[in-house]
Image: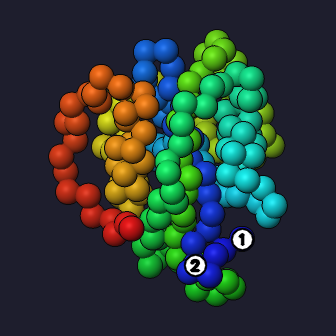
Amino acid sequence: MIDSEGYRPNVAIVLCNDRRRLFWGRRIGQNAWQFPQGGIKARETPEQAMYRELEEEVGLEPHQVEIIGSTDDWLHYRLPQRYIRHHCRPVCIGQKQRWFLLRLRCAEGDLCLDKSPEPEFDQWRWVKYWHPLREVVYFKRRVYARALEQLAPLLFPEGPPVRRYSNHLRQNCR
């Protein structure tokens, strides 16, 4: 499902533990780390898609998490030209995402990366709040920064931790 502007609707999941560390998953067979995410199917709400992706990618069910909040609107990122499949119709130029902040309400041992027949991740770890900005693929950095900036007050009402990441964010994002 691609919208009229060429963006694929998607959800992204920021899962935290009681120490306010974030789940950080390594894509299977790659040295690429990211948050769980996935497309929204026809007739599916962003929240329904989030719960489906949560179960598919990390093996958790709705009762095992608490929704802390979500981004107010869609956040967009464009794919680099080399990743755009111009032969596909409609052409997808990027993703528009609703981001959800969840708190783990079960044991870490309940996380299961191979619940789905096609796992997304082969490893995971807990990381500090701003850490993903250092490791996520370059073209997603700006959208990750915007999402984490919007969600930070929900997890850190006293004020977010100091953001030590200062490299130039190169991706165009609206």
Q: In screen coordinates, is 74 left or right of 114?
A: left
- 34 vs 41, nearest the viewer: 41
Q: Amino acid at mark 1?
A: Met
Q: Is residue 106 above or below residue 26?
A: above
- 59 vs 65, nearest the viewer: 65
- The residue to which callout 1 is attached is 1
- Badge 2 element: loop
Q: Position of residue 124 (x, y in %)?
A: 53, 30
Q: Position of residue 174 (x, y in %)?
A: 39, 68
Image quarter of residue 91: bottom right
Residue at 56% x, 53% y is 98
Regarding residue 165, the answer to whether it shows in the image is yes
- The residue to which callout 2 is attached is 6
Dot 2 crowding, Cα within 10 Å, few <14, some 14–19, many 20+: some
Residue at 52% x, 70% y is 94
Are the residues at dot 1 and dot 2 in contact (C-beta closer than 8 Å)? no
Q: Position of residue 161 (x, y in %)?
A: 26, 28
Q: Is residue 4 above or below residue 139?
A: below
Residue at 63% x, 25% y is 66
Dot placed on the residue nearer the N-terminal end, 1 or 2: 1
Q: Position of residue 92 (x, y in %)?
A: 59, 76
Residue at 28% x, 28% y is 159
